[in-house]
Image: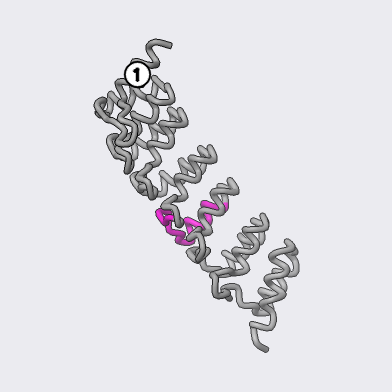
């Protein structure tokens, strides 16, 4: 019989979280990688609905790990990162998930892990050779995000992995500029030790690192 006949049932089971039904349907030959025009698969549906156990089973049954949501360019790896599921992140990477893909806004899995504060996933991505210098659409890098958020250990880890200390956003600001603006002096010190340029200015406001530093000094 046609595997497509069982595919709608597989999708429904993936959506509702019925693991036993998913298992049976896969055994009966349901087509795990059937995809709609917008890129939706059973795997996506399981992930979207928080059924990571089913998502895992589908990957182990041959689901493609690099399919992405056509509208947002979001990958399965990004979804797993957002859900904070480090085991699933590991499995996806083992199965060949591309770690440096960007979504429609130029955001990577690494930036999402940083944004959510999932340090363990962030370290895992760094260990797996993620490119720490990838820039978002506005030129933001992971180092800038970590510096702005005051995450000293992450800043250290990114620098050790080759993060460029003087990378600039489209507005001309850097990690040092962002961390100085937020008043994270310990990170500012570290970045300066690593060669950060103290004369950087924002193109739009003209504000400089030294200006923020003197403002902080008055407080």
Q: Which residue is mark 1?
A: 213
Residue 153, position as x, y percentages in the image: 44, 29
Please, is residue 96 above or below residue 152 in the view?
A: below
Visible residue check, residue 129: no
Residue 49, position as x, y percentages in the image: 67, 58
Q: Residue at x 73, y 61 (%)?
A: 17
| Quadrant of the image occupied by residue 199 | top left
Name the side, left or right, on which 31 lies relative to 127: right
Front residue of this view, candidates 120 and 41: 41
Spot the residue most to the top.
218
Residue 91, position as x, y percentages in the image: 53, 56
Q: Secondary structure at mark 1?
A: helix
Front residue of this view, candidates 204 and 139: 204
Please, is residue 36 above or below residue 194 in the view?
A: below
Residue 91: in magenta span? yes
Q: Residue at x 40, y 32 (%)?
A: 155
Please, is residue 77 above or below residue 216 in the view?
A: below
Name the side, left or right, on which 46 lies relative to 99: right
Magenta span covers which residues?
Answer: 88-102
Front residue of this view, candidates 104 and 92: 104
Residue 172: in magenta span? no
Total of numbered circles in the picture?
1
Quadrant where the C terminus sits is: top left
Spot the residue most to the bottom.
1
Residue 158, position as x, y percentages in the image: 37, 37
Please, is residue 24 above or below residue 52 in the view?
A: below
């Amino acid at each position: 019989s046609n595997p497509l006949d069982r595919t709608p049932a597989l999708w429904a089971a993936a959506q509702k979280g019925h693991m036993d039904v998913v298992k049976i349907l896969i055994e009966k030959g349901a087509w795990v990688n059937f995809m709609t025009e917008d890129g939706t698969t059973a795997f996506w549906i399981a992930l979207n609905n928080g059924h990571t156990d089913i998502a895992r089973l589908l990957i182990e049954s041959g689901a493609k790990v690099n399919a992405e949501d056509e509208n947002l360019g979001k990958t399965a790896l990004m979804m797993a990162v957002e859900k904070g599921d480090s085991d699933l992140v590991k499995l996806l990477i083992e199965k060949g998930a591309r770690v440096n893909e960007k979504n429609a806004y130029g955001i990577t899995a690494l930036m999402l892990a940083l944004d959510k504060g999932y340090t363990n996933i962030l370290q895992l991505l760094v260990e797996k050779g993620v490119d720490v210098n990838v820039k978002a659409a506005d030129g933001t890098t992971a180092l800038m995000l970590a510096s702005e958020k005051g995450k000293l250990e992450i800043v250290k880890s990114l620098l050790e992995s080759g993060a460029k200390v003087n990378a600039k956003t489209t507005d001309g600001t850097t990690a040092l500029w962002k961390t100085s603006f937020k008043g994270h002096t310990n990170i500012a010190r570290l970045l300066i030790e690593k060669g950060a340029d103290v004369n950087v200015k924002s193109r739009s406001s003209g504000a400089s690192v030294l200006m923020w530093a003197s403002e902080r000094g008055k407080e």
